[in-house]
Structures are given as C-alpha cells and as structure tokens.
Image: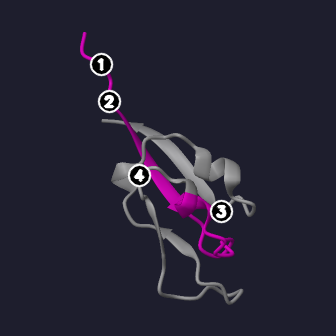
Amino acid sequence: MPAKIKAFTTSINGELCKACGYCAEVCPKEVFSQSGEFNKQGYNPFQVAHSENCVGCLTCIALCPEFAVSVIETED
C-alpha cells in the first residue's frame, strides 16, 4: 500500500493582515513574502508566494495575531 502524500494549501486574508511578518519569520520553507500593494487599513500585507513549499507545521497559524493565515490539507 503506497503512502499518502500530504500537500497543503496556504492562504492569507490580506484585509486582516497587519504586516507584522511573524508568518514569514517563522516559516521554515519561505512560503510567505510581502506584497507590493496596500490593504484598506494601509498595511502592506504578506502574501503566499510558494504554497507548494508548505509542510503543514502550522506555526504561522499559531503566531498570527490577526488570525489571517489559513492552511488546508489536501492529498496528492
């Protein structure tokens, strides 16, 4: 029986993000980067640059003070 390969889809709600950068700072796989646009609150939010690199450690979710990050498990 072959092992299931887990994949994760990561997203950030740009309207909630206050650009603290905690997600990018703690991510071991460099999934996040800062966007070049501003949200309605005037912040330059972070965005998902490489969702395919996500290993599902969920550290970004635990540290985001605005609950702007979500990680969903998918199967390949």
Extent of the magenta region: 1-25
What is the distance, in whole Å, between disc 4 and disc 3 at their CAs?
Answer: 18 Å
- First-in-chain label (4 vs 3): 4
Tell me which residue sits at (29%, 18%) in the image: 3
Amino acid carrying label 1: it is Ala
Q: CA distance from mark 4 to mark 1?
A: 22 Å
Tell me the kind of residue under disc 4: Lys
Earlier sequence position, callout 2 versus callout 4:
2
Q: Nearer the viewer, mark 4 or mark 3?
A: 4
- Name the secondary structure under disc 1: loop
Task: Please give the label number shown on residue 5.
Answer: 2
> Which circle's residue, 1 or 3, is located before the other in the chain?
1
| Residue 53 image offset from top left, x and y in percent | 36, 50
Residue 68 belongs to the span the image colors magenta: no
The first of marks 2 and 3 along the sequence is: 2
Image-quadrant location for residue 75: top left
Would you say the residues marked 1 and 2 are in contact, meaning their CB atoms lie under 8 Å apart?
yes
In the rendered image, residue 44, in percent from the top left (x then y), is placed at: 59, 84
- Which residue is at 69% across, 75% downward? 18
Residue 29 % position (x, y): 41, 52
Q: Name the residue tied to disc 3.
A: 68
